Image: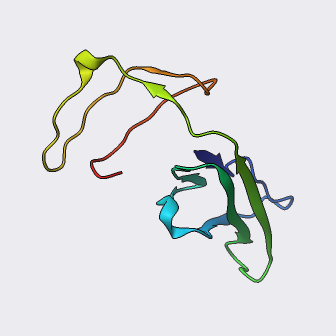
Amino acid sequence: MLLDAGASADPEDDAMVIAWTCKDQRLGCEQQGAKLTFVAASVGTVEVDLKVSKLIDPSQSQGQTVTIEVIASPKVTVDESRILKMEGQTTIALEGTCASCTEWNGSRSPGQ
């Protein structure tokens, strides 16, 4: 899952700090700039907090809780000829289809 707060803007055009907080640490949330990525591995509700603050005055901030209802785990199909045995840290490119997605780009590390 990818959430992007990059379109956030300050009416006075001041620089901003964007901070995402995951309420469930099992999601493996990772923030890069204004973007937050995580894996919702099961059906249910996922909540994350977004806080946007002015860089020059962090006391001027606004927050929002984002609630996402995961209605189905993605069903991904990968051709059997692409299956590899993985030992240690390995990077592979996956090609396949996702039956419940309109767009699919994915990567996965061993053990996830």
Residue pushed farthest bottom? 59
Residue depicted at x 72% and y 71%: 53
Lateral position of residue 36 relative to residue 30, left or right? right
- Image coordinates for residue 60, horizontal then vertical, percent: 80, 78
Q: Nearer the viewer, residue 38 or 19?
A: 38
Question: Quarter of the image containing the N terminus?
Answer: top right
- Image coordinates for residue 110, horizontal then vertical, percent: 27, 48
Residue depicted at x 61% and y 27%: 101
Q: Is residue 42 above or below residue 14?
A: above
- Image coordinates for residue 89, horizontal then vertical, percent: 18, 49
Q: Nearer the viewer, residue 2 or 27?
A: 27
Q: Nearer the viewer, residue 14 or 93?
A: 93
Residue pushed farthest left? 87
Give the quadrant of residue 83.
top left
Residue depicted at x 57% and y 54%: 36
Colouring used for the render? rainbow
Lateral position of residue 101 relative to residue 81, left or right? right
Give the quadrant of residue 106.
top left
Query: What number of labels is visible?
Result: 0
Lateral position of residue 11 relative to residue 99, left or right? right
Q: Is residue 68 above or below residue 58?
A: above
- Image coordinates for residue 107, horizontal then vertical, percent: 38, 38
Q: Is residue 31 above or below residue 75?
A: below
